[in-house]
Image: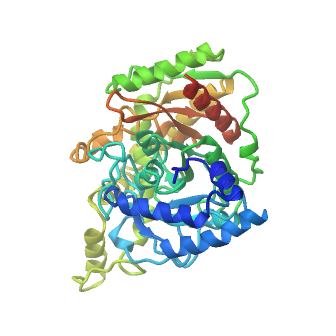
Amino acid sequence: MEQYTSLSSVQKDIKSGKLQLVELVNKYLERIEDKKHLNAFVEVYAAEARQQAVTVNEKILSGSGGKLAGMVVGIKDLICYQGHKVSAGSKIIENYTSIFSSTVVERLLAEDAIIIGRQNCDEFAMGGSNENSYYGAVKNDADNSKVPGGSSGGSAVAVQAGLCLASLGTDTGGSVRQPAAFCGVVGLKPTYGRVSRHGIIAYASSFDQVGPITHTVEDAALLMEVIAGPDDYDSTASQLPVPEYSQCLTLSEKKRIAYLPETLSSEGLDPEVKALTEQTIQRLLDEGHSVEPISFPYLDYVVPTYYILTMAEASSNLARYDGVHYGYRSPNAVDLETTYKKSRSEAFGAEVKRRILLGSFVLSAGHYDAFYGKAQRVRRLIREKTDEILENHDFILLPTTPGPAFGIGEKTDDPVTMYLADIFTVQASLAGIPAISLPLGKTNNNLPLGVQFIGKRFGEAELLAFSKYLLDVTKAH
């Protein structure tokens, strides 16, 4: 059976009788088993997926299937699905079964998507390599000695390795885009508030967004069309109407694009990443677009600002996992104080504990203004400067990551080096605007490389149309 990379080809073959959806589901289940060493899935819903496939296949043939009929999707282990376990990659809620479904899951199911399982991720989405999971590291299918990126590493690898057609990940500071770049797939972070966060286990509430990981821009657009929109359960979800993204994928005019020269002269930028970025700039110029350098003076501040704010929010959000209400409770606890201390110290991983401690520190009475208050002010500056650039330009172009996928274990002993890997993705997160990573090249060693484009607030339609155009142009060359 061919390895499908788009929903349109799946639906076409089902309608022609060439394919039965249950056959496709079985093929995915076989591949998940064959590639078990990648550790992409924490749990697979085999019987359920097969049963759903039979029903959806009939709907497609009768013409009553939803927009996502035939799409086999994996969901990150942060996304609640009623009657199914969700653990955020952590021991502390290892056996928690969700009593409700997140809004995004309800919307997937309403349009006849088939959810095949939950995917491995860094614990509570804290990490850029998927080495921080309670369930062990995920491996990159392009090279099993390399990381897949994080925190949505399992979600990206599942699409890369053909274990499902698409995934839903979450992006706080690059957790969809960075693994998409490392795995050679499309990864979109929507505008903050475009997609409901109801039923998503929180890391940093003012940053977290659900985003699609796919082979094609068309499938990313279709998923966004389904999952986006207002939600009574999430007061931060935007009330703006959702465009039909899948019908807006034609580029109507030449675009004005800014690139940040500071990113290309950034210390530690891999030469092959720099060459691909410059090649993309030249290709866009050759195609008649305007591409010009625009200085962004805050590049050195984006990573510290992002980590101060997200660690502070994590410290607050993760206070609920205390060994009292639900989740892991230490068998060694003897009173209330030891219940808190032992349960949290035994069940949280090292990176989560580090971020809780640092977050508690920056929120403490003696340091609040010096760290948290100042970071909030810098966030405003970053947002205003980014918006200013986008007033005169359609998009901002920059690398997705400083380098290709690095080796498993290579950066685990140096958290600061690991955090600096987010230098190009956190700008869009701090500004709360959409950004996409596109698989536009590979290294000499055949490792995928991504180029990133940042769009205007709620400008996903224009960003997706441009992304499809650029991928088509790149393939043509």
Any part of residue 86 in sight: yes
**Picture coordinates of residue 26, whole percent (x, y):** 50, 65
Q: Is residue 404 left or right of residue 397?
A: left
Residue at point 32%, 80% (across, down): 329
Towards the viewer: 122 or 315: 122
Q: How is the image coloured?
A: rainbow
**Picture coordinates of residue 160, whole percent (x, y):** 45, 47
Q: How many marks?
A: 0
Q: Is residue 238 left or right of residue 46?
A: right
Towards the viewer: 200 or 288: 288
Position above or below: 454 against 193: above
Q: Is residue 363 left or right of residue 438?
A: left
Any part of residue 77 in sight: no
Position above or below: 219 against 297: below
**Picture coordinates of residue 427, whole percent (x, y):** 50, 36
Residue at point 72%, 45% (across, down): 245
Which image quarter: residue 273? top left
**Picture coordinates of residue 158, whole percent (x, y):** 45, 54
Please state, as top left, top right, bottom left or bottom right, where the C terminus lies in the image: top right
Position above or below: 308 against 337: above
Residue at point 36%, 38% (across, down): 421
